[in-house]
Image (tube, rainbow, N blue to C red):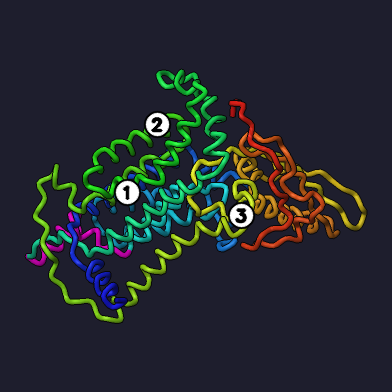
Amino acid sequence: MIERVRGWLRAHMSSPRDAAGLAAFRVFIGVLGTISALRFLHYGWVDALFVTPRFHFKYWFAPFVEPLSRTGMVTVFWIIAASGLLIALGLCYRLAIVTFLLAFSYVQLIDVTNYLNHYYLLSLLALLMTCMPLGQVYGLDGWLSARQNGLRPRTTLPGWCVAILRLQIAVVYTYAGVAKLTGDWLVHAQPLSIWLSARTSLPLVGPLLAEPWAPLAMSWLGCAFDLTIVCWLSWRKTRPWAFAALVMFHALTRHLFPIGMFPFIMVASASVLFEPGWPRRWLPLPAATAWAKRPTSGPRLALGGAALALFALVQVLAPLRTFAYGGDVHWHEQGMRFSWRVMVREKNASVTYLVDDLRSGRTVEVSPRAYLDARQEREFATQPDLIAQLARHIARERSGKTGSPVRVRAEVLANLNGRRATLLLDPNVDLANTHESIAPAPWILPIPEGQPSLLRASR
């Protein structure tokens, strides 16, 4: 039985598939990557996010990543824009996609407070695309190669190219839906109730959002959408209606909330769930024919299959780590990143550091604003690991200046989804003595008892 399943899987993954759909996907991702980079350059976000800040929060697995000079950072974004354009054209594709992956991932790793789910997704898609010869299918690389060798351009790709991309998109939507299976979301309609109350003045939809039932209805519809949209898009009979619903869903969220490129990336990514040759309905493309090439050697095929299986396993299991910590992940934030918990909490906090000089016994209050800009302060204040990271930096700086050992504590008042503000961290713990780790942090206090506020307060 196992051998039969293995044989079927091997045949399914290696069988040729029409590459027209993946060629369109390549164009979408390349164009969106270019637009994203140009937006950073146009709106001055390169300076605001990478040049002006005096302190950058590090990922525990990449503490060595540092920003370049202003000229260097601007150059990096022009490289991203240029490589995105080459990806879309399918020209110098291998070099372009690797360059895009490295440059785009680099800027995402500079500061944790810049983390966005859709940019993490874009890095993952680029990683997968480095393994696929997408420039050879309906791209300039394929056209030039065919013209030089007197052969027909390639029109098919092995089935695994489609399968792994479909899995990645399915993971995103499924875990986004799982994150909404909470009492806050389904019973109390939070945080949508809070957010929508600030949108009631919008034309057309504003009066509808003011209705008492609107937040709860949208909460349930949003959860159902995330949990089922992949199935509806994968089924041919429901695909047109599902895609129309997907476009309307992301257009509405784009209209209501400032979420940048997220809707565009998700709409473009959904195309991998269509039948592989879907662009042929509108474009006169050459017929898809099997690509003649030497069979891949056994060891190489096994290695490639193992790499794909490992990637899939990590993507499926990594978001589940949130449940290993217990408690409410939206409160303690452990396992929050890289788990596709998209727009599921309204959380605000204020942080005051207390620096105790262990030699003199004096205690000094330190504001985070001495180290951070307003955006960083707003983002870091709700994330305990970042609060501890800045505390360690403050301790090193103060000890270096005074030559005296110090202890750094933090008074952090936070509220989640309309609950009353309460202490997020134990104010007696020396955060300077903590370490970067994925282990549970005992100095994070449990979420206070009580339900989220039902008041539709302004954000």
Residue beneath the point at 71% across and 55% down: 393
Q: Is residue 104 part of the magenta span, yes or no?
A: no
Residue beneath the point at 37% across and 46% down: 228
Q: Residues within 10 Å of mark 2 (few under 14, many from 20)?
A: few
User: Upstream in the sequence, badge 3 or badge 1?
Assistant: 1
Q: Are marks 1 and 2 in contact (CB under 8 Å)?
A: no
Q: Residues within 10 Å of mark 1 (few under 14, many from 20)?
A: some
User: The N terminus is located in which quarter?
Assistant: bottom left
Magenta highlight range: 131-150
Give 396 or 431, whichever is nearer the viewer: 431
Residue beneath the point at 38% across and 60% down: 127
Say which of marks 1 and 2 sits in front.
Answer: 1
Q: Quick one: SS at disc 1?
A: helix
User: Upstream in the sequence, badge 1 or badge 2?
Assistant: 1
Give 316 or 371, whichever is nearer the viewer: 316
Q: Amino acid at mark 2?
A: Leu
Task: Tell me the number on the disc at residue 55.
Answer: none
Task: Tell me the number on the disc at residue 231.
Answer: 1
Could one spot residue 75 in this view of the protein?
Answer: no
Q: Which residue is mark 3?
A: 334
User: The C terminus is located in which quarter?
Assistant: top right
Q: Are marks 3 and 2 in contact (CB under 8 Å)?
A: no
Predominant SS of the magenta segment: helix
Q: Which residue is mark 2?
A: 252
Residue 147: x and y in percent read 10, 61
Q: Quick one: SS at disc 3?
A: loop
Determine the CA span between mark 1 and mark 2.
Answer: 21 Å
Q: Work out whether 160 lies above or below 361.
A: below
Judge left or right: residue 121 versus residue 151.
right
Give 413 or 120, whichever is nearer the viewer: 413
Residue 118: x and y in percent read 43, 47
Determine the CA span between mark 3 and mark 2.
Answer: 30 Å
